[in-house]
Image (spheres, grey):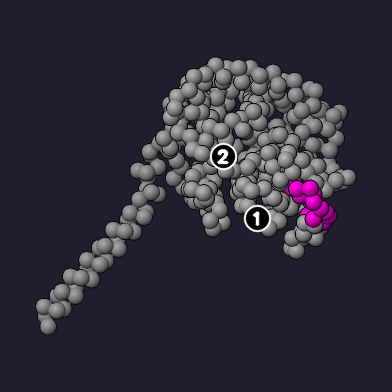
Amino acid sequence: MRRSLLAVTIFAVALIATFGGLAFVWAAPHSSKASQRPEGDWRILDPVTYENISIFPVVGGSQDTSSFLTLEEGLASGEVIVTEGGAAGMLRNRGQIRPIATPQYDTSASVNQLVLINRSKRPLLLLAGELVSGGKQDRIIGKDRIVPVGAEPLALDVFCVEHGRWTGGSAQFKSSKTIVHPSVREQAAVDQKQTEVWAAVAGGSTAARASSSAPAPRLSPGVLADVISSEAATQSYEKIYESRRVGMSVDSLVDELQKRFSRATNGVNGERKMLVVGVVVAYGGEVAWSDIFASSDLFHQYWRKLLRSYAVEALARPTLRETASLDDAREFLRRPNGREVQETEAGVYRWREITEGHLALIELDALQPKPMTLHRLLLHRTS
C-alpha cells in the first residue's frame, strides 16, 4: 500500500514538472532574452541620406506573394469596389449587370465605415494609410488586413482625410495611388482617433508640434494653413500635399532620394537570395519608421507611394542635420517586448500589435496559401 502511494506521488510530481516545463517553453518567446534578438533574417545596408532624411535599405529572402492583390490593382481593374455605406445599385461584372447587396448592418453613409467588395480570384491586401478618393469624403484604410476571395461585402473601418466635405456625385471610390505620411498613418493605425488624424493632416507632423525649439520645417503648420485656405478648402489630403506649393518640394525630394536609393541598391537585386524587401527611415538622428514586406515584388509595388509619404514627413519635420547610424537602425529593428493584441480571421489572416514604450510593432500574417508575414510596420510613436 505504501509502495502504491509512493508511486502515485512520484507520478504526480513528474506530471506537474512536465506541464510546468511546457508552460515555461510557451512563455519563453515573451522573455527579455528573446526580445534582445534581432528580428528577421535581414541585412541592413548603409543609408541613403539627403537633407534631414536617411533611408536604410533592408535586404533579405523574398517569398512568393503573387497570389495576393493590392488595393490599387483591384480598384484599377474593377475587381474591387469601395462604396459609401448604403450605396445600393447595379454593378457590372464580366460584361453582365448584377445587383450587389449592401450589408444589412448599415443603411446609411458613415464617416468611419465604407463597404468593400472583393470580386477577384485573389485575396486582397489592405494597408493602413492607403487613400481612396471620392464618395462624400476621401478616406484612408484604418488597419492592415486581408479580404479573402468570395467574401461577403465587408464593413471597412476607415478614417476621413477631408474634413470639410460631405457631398459627392458618385458613391464609389477610386485609388488615389497615395499612402499618407507617417504622422497620419500613426494616428490611424495605432491611436485610431479621427480627431488626431485630422490634426495630423492639417499640421503636417505630430513630431514637429512636439519639438517647438527645433529649426522650423519647410512644411510648417503656417505654410499648410496658407495652402488650405488658398487651394484645399475642404482640407483634402490630396489637394494639400499635391498642391503647387507643396507638391513641387515633395517631388524634388522624392526624385533625389529615388536616384540615390537606386544607386545604393543597384546590383543587390541581382543576388539570388538577397533582395530589397523594405526600409528603415530616420529623420535627423531619430530612427522613426520601418516598412518591411514578405517579398521584393510586394515592396516595389508600394515603394513609390511609400517614398513620397516619407518625403512629406521629412519636409514637415524640423530641419535637423544629425544622421542616424547603421547601429541605430539595427537596434530599432529589434522586436519590442511589451503588451500584445491579436485579431484573427480563421484561415485568412492574423493581425498583431505589440507596444513597448514609444515603440509600436504591427504585423500582418497571411495564413493561406502558406503562413507568412506579409507586412511588418514598426514605428517610434510621436504621441
Mark 1 sits on what residue?
150
Crowdedness of circle 2 by 10 Å Cα count: few (<14), some, many (20+)?
few
Please, what is the three-letter code of the amino acid marked with disc 1?
Answer: Gly
Q: Nearer the viewer, residue 33 or 55?
A: 55
Give residue 139's mark: none
Residue at (69, 42) in percent of width and height: 74
Residue 81: x %, y % from top left: 74, 48
Give residue 66's mark: 2
Please indicate, yes or no, whether residue 159 appears anywhere in the rendered image: no
Residue at (64, 48) in percent of width and height: 121
Residue bounds of the magenta highlight: 81-98
312, above or below 334, in the image: above
Please, what is the three-letter code of the amino acid marked with disc 2?
Answer: Ser
Label 2 or label 1, whichever comes before in sequence order: 2
Q: Does the magenta stretch include residue 264?
A: no
Callouts 2 and 1 close, C-beta under 8 Å: no
229, above or below 15, in the image: above
Q: In which quarter of the image is residue 213?
A: top right
Q: What element carries label 2?
A: loop
Residue 250: x %, y % from top left: 70, 23
Q: How far apart are marks 2 and 1 (CA)?
A: 18 Å
